[in-house]
Amino acid sequence: LHEQLRTALEAAQPDAAAVGRLTITAHQQRQEMEKQHEALKQRLRALLTPEQQAKFDALHAQHKQSGQRGPGGFLRPVALKRMLPTVEADERFATMFLDEARIAACIASPNVVSVLDFGTEDGTPFIVMELVVGASLSQLVRAAVAQKAPVPEDVALEVLAQAAQGLHDAHEAKAPTGEALEIVHRDVSPQNVLVAADGRVRITDFGVARAV
C-alpha cells in the first residue's frame, strides 16, 4: 500500500525541471518589467519641473511615515476616499459609493488602484485604497504643455498600454462567487489615469463603472 501511495504521489508531482524553467522565466519577465518601469519613471520625471520633482519626492517621503499601522511596527501607506459632506445624505450617491468599493475590490491588477477596505466613521463612509505617489495623466500633460515639450511618443504609448491592461483586467474580473463581472469603467479620462513615481500606470475611480 505504501509503495502504491508513493507511486501515485510521484505521478501527481510536476516535473521539477519544468517548474524550474517556469520560475526562471517568471523571474526574467519580472526583471524586464522592472526595467521598463524604471525607464518610464525617468522619462516621466523629465517632464516635471525641478519644483514639481521636489514636491513629489517630499510627498513620497512623507507617506513613508504614515498609513495603516499594526503590531510589530507594521506600516502601510494608504489613501482614504470619503464622500463629500454635501452629498453623503443623498441615497443615490451613497449607493454609488458602496458599489464602487464592491466593484473595485474584485479587481486584481497591477494597473488598477487596489481597494483594501471599506468602513464608516461618524456615519460617513470611506474607502481605503492603495496610495499612488505620482501624478495623474492630466497633470503630466499640463506640465508638458507649460514647458512646451510634448510627451515623448514612446512614453505616451507605454502609458496607454498599461492603462489598457488595467481596463482589460477589470473587464475580466470575477466576483467572489466566480461570476464574471465584465466591468466597464465608463469614465476613462486623464484625471483617472495615475502614473506613479515607480513608472507604473494605474486606473482609478470606478464610481460610475458598470458590472454588466
Image: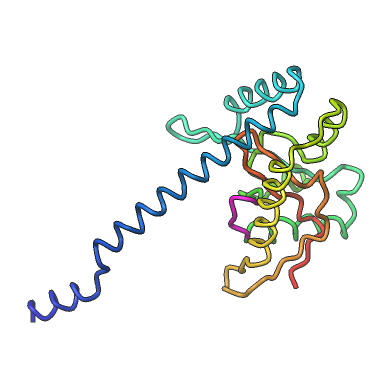
Whether 110 is among the magenta residues is yes
Q: Residue at x 67, y 62 (%)?
A: 168
Q: Residue at x 70, y 46 (%)?
A: 159
Residue 128 drawn at (x, y percent): 66, 45
Residue 31 drawn at (x, y percent): 46, 43
Residue 71 drawn at (x, y percent): 45, 34
Decide which of 80, 59 is in the foreground and name it: 59
Q: Residue at x 77, y 43 (%)?
A: 82
Whether 148 is among the magenta residues is no
All told, the count of numbered labels is: 0
Q: What coloring was used for the rendering?
A: rainbow
Per the picture, the main secondary structure of the magenta-coloured stretch is loop
Decide which of 116, 17 is in the foreground and name it: 17
Q: Is residue 154 above or below residue 140?
A: below
- Quarter of the N terminus within the rendering: bottom left
- Quarter of the C terminus within the rendering: bottom right
**Which residue range is magenta in the image?**
107-111
Say which quarter of the image contains residue 98: bottom right
Say which quarter of the image contains residue 140: top right
Residue 19 drawn at (x, y percent): 30, 61
Q: Is residue 164 above or below residue 59?
A: below
Decide which of 69, 40 is in the foreground and name it: 40
